[in-house]
Image (tube, rainbow, N blue to C red):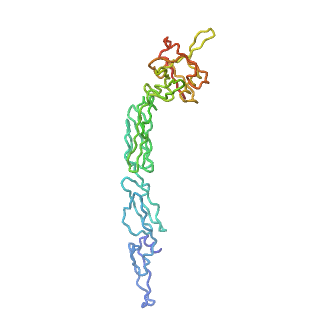
Amino acid sequence: MFADLDCCLGRKLLCKNQPLPWARNRPTRPKLVEPSQVCDGIRDCPLGEDENCIKCENPPQVESGYRVDNQTVFTVGAVVSYTCIPGFVVREMDTIYCDYRGLWSQAPVCDKLCGDLPSVRNGSVSASGLLTPGTTVIVFCDDGFEPLRNFFTCATNGSWIGNPACVRREFIKNYLGGFSPAPNSSMKITCNEMGEWTGNPACFINPPCTNVVTTTKGVLWRLCDGYAPGIGHPSKGRIEVNFDGTWGTVCDDGDFLDVDGNIESFPWSVESLNVACRTFGFSKSTGVNRRRAYFGEGVGPILLDDVICTGSETLFTDCSHSRDHIATGECSHSEDQGIECI
């Protein structure tokens, strides 16, 4: 222990005297050992106290890293430095030291670096320096575009989390959600363990009409142009019906007889709207009236008029309706009925 103290304080070590049989009680000449000779693996003192030191074992191995020194003896206070192989970076401290107990301090960790960020269409990524785990980079969209999601985050395993996109401002207003994942495509991009991007995200635009429903007697129903002209939505749009193979629209008024026996027209009731939603599979939804060609004017004949439901009907075809006024031209496509089920 004294040897170790002298070593660490930078003083020369005074060796103990070795008794000599022929010298009897006469003092022997003291021997001094330089600090660089203490604990160097070579015995310089006669009794070997210059090598009676506390030492650490060989430094620990670091995954994806290596030492940058050539030391072979590790006494108390020895410091060892590490660096990481290309593609990795040291987390926090890059050195360890041998403490007074002969134990190494906590070994460094080499984290995987993420590869180059993928390009974002109609936008750019702002980042500088090494992209280490926990780093968040922001996506800036070009003029005229808005972000749907605007950042990537680098995870501890080097993979990127996030799926940013820049879309036209008018697209956000009119077409948000009007796309569906393409068949056999993954909707995410992943940075793998090699720092390479994998994935095949792809979208296709929804067809103009969605949610085709077959009811009794072979009557078909569908919702059209719910997102925008030419882009359908499963729960809203212009109501269209198919009789005998022909698609047409539905007029937005219902008729009733007043107390004097005159025919009066009025917007669809809440009961009619709710039954319409029930027909399209939204049994617990509330129907919002979207009349006066709210989702655009349809084409072809107007096949249904004077729809009146009590609310107890299971399907739309069970409601009272008429086809008698279709040929008279009392309804035009500017009165095409639409609905939104929420």
Identify the residue at the far top of this view: 260
Residue 260 falls in image quadrant: top right
Please provide percent x and percent y for residue 248: 47, 20
Q: Which of 133 and 193 is in front in this view?
A: 193
Please provide percent x and percent y for residue 298: 45, 20
The residue sitting at 40% across, 78% down in the picture is: 43
The residue sitting at 46% across, 25% down in the picture is: 225
The residue sitting at 40% across, 61% down in the picture is: 81
* Above or below for 337 versus 182: above
Please provide percent x and percent y for residue 240: 49, 22
- Looking at the rendered structure, the number of numbered marks drawn on it comes to 0
Answer with left or right where residue 310 lies relative to residue 301.
Answer: right
Residue 80 falls in image quadrant: bottom left
Q: Nearer the viewer, residue 49 or 325?
A: 325
Identify the residue at the far right of this view: 259
Q: Quadrant of the C terminus?
A: top right
The residue sitting at 37% across, 61% down in the picture is: 68
Please provide percent x and percent y for residue 227: 46, 27
